[in-house]
Amino acid sequence: MVRAESQQDEQRWRHVEAATGATLSRLDVADLFDEVLDRVRELLQVDTAAILLLDVRARHLVATAARGLEEEVRQGFRVSVGRGFAGQVALTQRPVIIEDVSRDKVVNPVLLQTGVRSLLGVPILSGGSLVGVLHVGSLVPRRFGPDDVRLLELVATHVGLAGRVRQNTLDHSAALALQRSLIPAELPDLPSLRMAGRYVPGHASGVGGDWYDVFTLPSGWLGVVMGDVSGHGLQSAIIMGRIRSALRAYALVCDDPAEALTLLDRKVVHFEAGSLTTALYAMIPPDGATIHLSLAGHPAPVLAAPGRRTATVAAHIDPPLGIGRTGIRRRTTTIDFPPGGVLVAYTDGLVERRDELFDAGVARLAAAVPLASPDTVCDTVMATLDAENPADDVALLAIRRSGG
C-alpha cells in the first residue's frame, strides 16, 4: 500500500512538471495560462481553476484566465486584496482552504452561481512579490490535503517564475504600460502630509484619460493634480500624458494654481484641439495648513476634519480645459487644512451612476470618508462606493495632514 501511494505521488509530480515545464514556454501568455489550468484540473481532479493577477495601482485581483469559471473572466471580475477568498490568499500570501463555500466566505457571485462547494487557493509569487492568485474548486464537498496544497504551490511557483507573467500582469498592450507609467508608483512622504492613491480602469482595455499626480516643487510646496481627459483608449492616454507633462512644467513657473491652469488651457486649445479635459490643481505649503485650489470643470474635493461635517470644499469651479472660450478668468480658492484633516480628490467615475443624480454620489462619498490613514480612506471609499468594477475610469487621491 505504501509503495502504491509512493508511485502515485511520483506520477502526480511528473504531471506537475508537464504542466509547468519548458514545453509551455513557447506559448503566449493567454495560451500558457489556459494550458496550465487545463492540466491543473486534471492533476488535482477538480472542476474549476482560475488565475487572478494583481493590479498593483488599484490593489485589486483581476480574473485573467479560468476553466469552469469562464464567466468570471468575461465579466472582468475584480476583488480588493483582503476581500473574499482570493483576497485573503493575496493578503496573507499563504494557502487558503474553504471546505464549505458560503456567501459569507466568498464575494465572487460566479463561484456561488457555479455551485462550487470547496476551494483551495495559493499565492503566485515572483521574486518575493505577489503577482496574483491561483485557485481550484470542486462542485462536490472535498477536503484538500497537504499534498494538494504542495502540488498547487509548485504550479504557482512555476507560473510566477515565468518572466512573461510579471511582464504581462495586466499589461497586455503597450497602451496599458503607458497608462501605468503615468500614474505615480510612489507618492511623496512628507512630515506634515501623508497620502495614498488608487486608479481603476472602467473598461476592457484598461486604458483611459483619468490620472492623478503629486510632486514637490523647488519652493518646498506640494503640487497636487487630478484630471480627466474625455474618451478612452490609447489616444486619450497619450493626450493625458502630454497634458500631465505640460502641467508639471507650468507648475515650475507659476506660484498660483489658476495661472498654471490658464496656461494649460491655452496649450490644450492649441495643441490638443477637440480634447475636453477637467482638472484640479492644488498647492499645499510645507506646513500643510492651507490648500490653494483651482478647478477647471472638475468636481470639488471632499474635506473631512475633526469636529466638522464632511463635505465638498467651497471652491469656484471654472470651465473645463479645451473648450476654446477666450477671456476665461480662472480663480484660486484658499481653504484651511486642519490637523488630522483628510482631503479626497477624485474623478467622476467614482461617484457617477446612471440611475441617480451626481450630487447623490458625492453625498455617498462624503459619508464614506473616515478620519483615518490615507490607505484606509482609499480602501473604505472604494469598497463603499462599489468601485472595484466601475463603468468608467476611477482615480482617487487621499491626503491627510498630520496631527489632530
Image: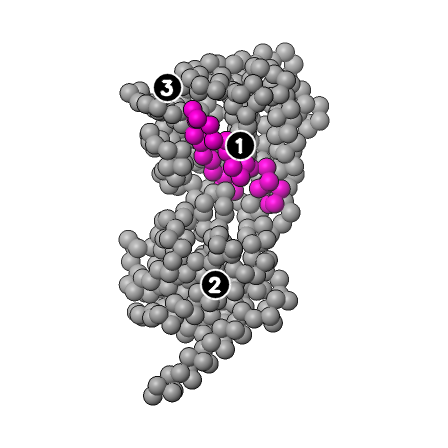
> As drawn, is 175 to the left or to the right of 38?
right
Residue at the disc numbered 3: 338
Residue placed at 37% from the left, 48% from the top?
82
Residue placed at 48% from the left, 20% from the top?
286
Q: Amino acid at mark 2?
A: Ala
Residue placed at 43% from the left, 44% from the top?
388
Residue 178 found in image quarter: top right
Q: CA distance from mark 3 to mark 1?
A: 23 Å
Residue at the disc numbered 1: 212
Q: CA distance from mark 2 to mark 3?
A: 48 Å
In percent of width and height, residue 223 lies at: 53, 24
**Do we see residue 48 in this rendering?**
no
Task: Indicate the quadrant containing the N terminus: top left, top right, bottom left or bottom right.
Answer: bottom left
In percent of width and height, residue 331 lies at: 54, 13
Residue at the disc numbered 2: 156
Task: Indicate the quadrant containing the C terminus: top left, top right, bottom left or bottom right.
Answer: top left
Q: Amino acid at mark 1?
A: Tyr
Which range is magenta? Answer: 176-202
Depth check, mark 1 against mark 2: the one in front is 2
